[in-house]
Image (tube, rainbow, N blue to C red):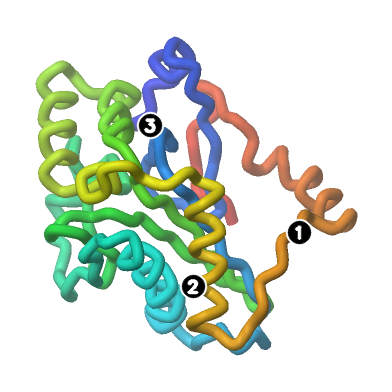
Amino acid sequence: DSVDFAACERAGVDVARRPTGGRAVLHAREWTYSVIFPADSSFYRKSILETYLVIARWLLAGLQSLGIAASLAPERHIPAGELTGPDGQSCFSVPSSYEIIADGRKLVGSAQRRWPDVVLQHGSILVGEEHLGIADLLHLGAAGREELKKDLRRRTAWIEQFVQKPPALEDFARLMAEKWEEIFPVRVEEGGLFPEEEKRAGELISRFRVVREEEPVRNSH
């Protein structure tokens, strides 16, 4: 209900559901990642947090190799008030325990979903400040939009604040592949989807399709 579909259409921004659910995210200038593995994988851990911390080692290694003093946020209790109101509508406005931060501010937003036989974790690494534009795509008044932008500036960090010339996406992807091989006993191979995976992706389009105002955004099951 928080998404202003008319504003999204004017801005040329598509709206889609995420299998992991959660608050709104504006995918603007960023690096995104996803890690998917079966339950019998050596990466699998019994809890969401344990699995997240395994993947966080890799993310931290890549960011630190760019000269960014990235670290895990300390454990904290999020007051109920932070989950409501303008600053509770954006995924990046509410930092959680153990999320990756730089200079005390959230740099990486991640989400995880687990099924009986597979785990999915995906997330965004902010490169520029374009994510602040989400305030213009939510049902907020002028004061609410300014409040959210101010809050996001205070709570989020992005690569350009620490690296004068961020690497191109392709170069960063190669760096992350190298870090994966350094940390885990696996070999990274570049490839695409198998035919059966492409078929399955096509079957799932209707579930995560772009939604319209008359179709409220709901978490998928």
The residues bearing labels 1 and 3 have C-alpha atoms spaced at a distance of 38 Å
Confirm whether residue 13 shows in the render.
yes
| Relative side of 76 to 92, left or right | left
Residue at image location 48% in from the left, 50% down from the top: 32
Instruction: Name the residue at 35% across, 55% down.
Output: 109
Is 188 on the left or on the right of 217, as rendered?
right
| Residue at 32%, 47% in the rendered image | 91
Q: Residue furthest top?
A: 10
Q: Nearer the viewer, mark 1 or mark 2?
A: 2
Residue 184 screen position, x and y as percent: 54, 84
Q: Is residue 62 above or below residue 82?
A: below
Q: Nearer the viewer, mark 1 or mark 3?
A: 1
> Image quarter for residue 29?
top left
Image coords of residue 220 (percent x, y): 57, 51
Of the two numbered discs 3 and 2 on the same chain, state the one appearing first in sequence.
Answer: 3
Which numbered disc, 3 or 2, marks the residue closer to the eye?
2
Name which residue type carries label 3: Asp
* Residue 1 badge: 3
Q: Amino acid at mark 2?
A: Lys
Q: Which quarter of the figure is the N terminus placed in?
A: top left
The residue beneath circle 2 is: 179
Going from N to C along the chain, the mark reached first, 1 or 2, is: 2
Q: Amino acid at mark 1?
A: Gly
Give the Cα separation between the discs numbered 1 and 2. 18 Å
Residue 50 position in % (x across, y down): 41, 83
Question: Which residue has dot 1 on it?
Answer: 191
